[in-house]
Image (spheres, rainbow, N blue to C red):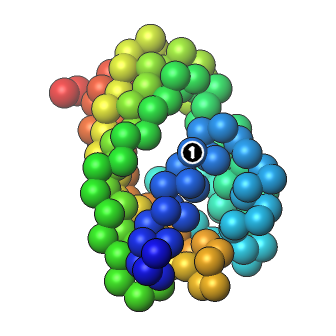
């Protein structure tokens, strides 16, 4: 398997581990110095524990969350993933009480990988679309 294919598989495995809150996988495959750059989050995501904290903030709000992976582009030590976030808002999400509404938003995630370990992540989500789907903004 090429380095690019191995890196794509690492990213596939990341999303599986995220949904499962597999902290063992996270500890092995996410650098302690890992940083997620995400302007839409009210807290920093650093290291495997930060990824677990992100899970704990999102999954209670969207317990049926799915992350369909649509495209991968790998070059060198970077992998770009295009995916969707789908789920039903049945728990509090920040200050927003549950709405019972479904979301389906687009995401672009760029991962930096060194020596088979995730070291950096840039996330771009359609937060405006999500807020409209949740009824927090007019459609």
Q: Residue at x 66, y 61 (%)?
A: 45
Front-lying residue, 71 or 1: 1
- In the displayed image of the protein, which residue is found farthest to the top? 100
Q: Is residue 54 left or right of residue 6?
A: right
Q: Is residue 56 left or right of residue 98?
A: right
Front-lying residue, 111 or 2: 2
Q: Residue at x 44, y 11 (%)?
A: 100
Q: Is residue 1 left or right of residue 115?
A: left
Q: Residue at x 49, y 55 (%)?
A: 12
Label 1: state its secondary structure: helix
Mark 1 surroundings: few (<14), some (14-19) or many (≥20) residues within 10 A? some
17 relative to 27, above or below: above
Quarter assignment of residue 123: bottom left
Q: Position of residue 22 (x, y in %)?
A: 73, 45
Q: What residue did someone put label 1 on? A: 16
- In the displayed image of the protein, which residue is found farthest to the bottom? 76
28 relative to 100, above or below: below
Quarter assignment of residue 93: top right
- In the displayed image of the protein, which residue is found farthest to the left? 139
Residue 117 visible in this rendered orientation of the protein: yes
Q: Position of residue 27 (x, y in %)?
A: 79, 62
Q: Residue at x 35, y 83 (%)?
A: 75
58 relative to 87, above or below: below
Q: Which quadrant of the figure contains the C terminus?
A: top left
Q: Position of residue 39 (x, y in %)?
A: 47, 61
Q: Position of residue 116 (x, y in %)?
A: 62, 77
Front-lying residue, 79 or 49: 79
Quarter assignment of residue 132: top left
Front-lying residue, 11 or 58: 11
């Amino acid at each position: 398997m090429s380095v690019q294919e191995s890196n794509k598989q690492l990213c596939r495995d990341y999303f599986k581990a995220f949904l499962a809150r597999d902290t063992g996988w996270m500890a092995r495959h996410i650098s302690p110095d890992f940083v997620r750059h995400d302007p839409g989050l009210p807290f920093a995501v650093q290291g495997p524990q930060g990824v677990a904290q992100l899970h704990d903030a999102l999954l209670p709000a969207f317990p049926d969350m799915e992350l369909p992976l649509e495209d991968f582009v790998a070059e060198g030590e970077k992998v770009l993933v295009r995916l969707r976030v789908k789920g039903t808002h049945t728990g509090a999400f920040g200050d927003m009480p549950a709405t019972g509404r479904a979301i389906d938003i687009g995401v672009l995630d760029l991962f930096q990988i060194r020596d088979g370990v995730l070291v950096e992540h840039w996330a771009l989500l359609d937060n405006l679309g999500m807020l409209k789907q949740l009824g927090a903004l007019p459609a």
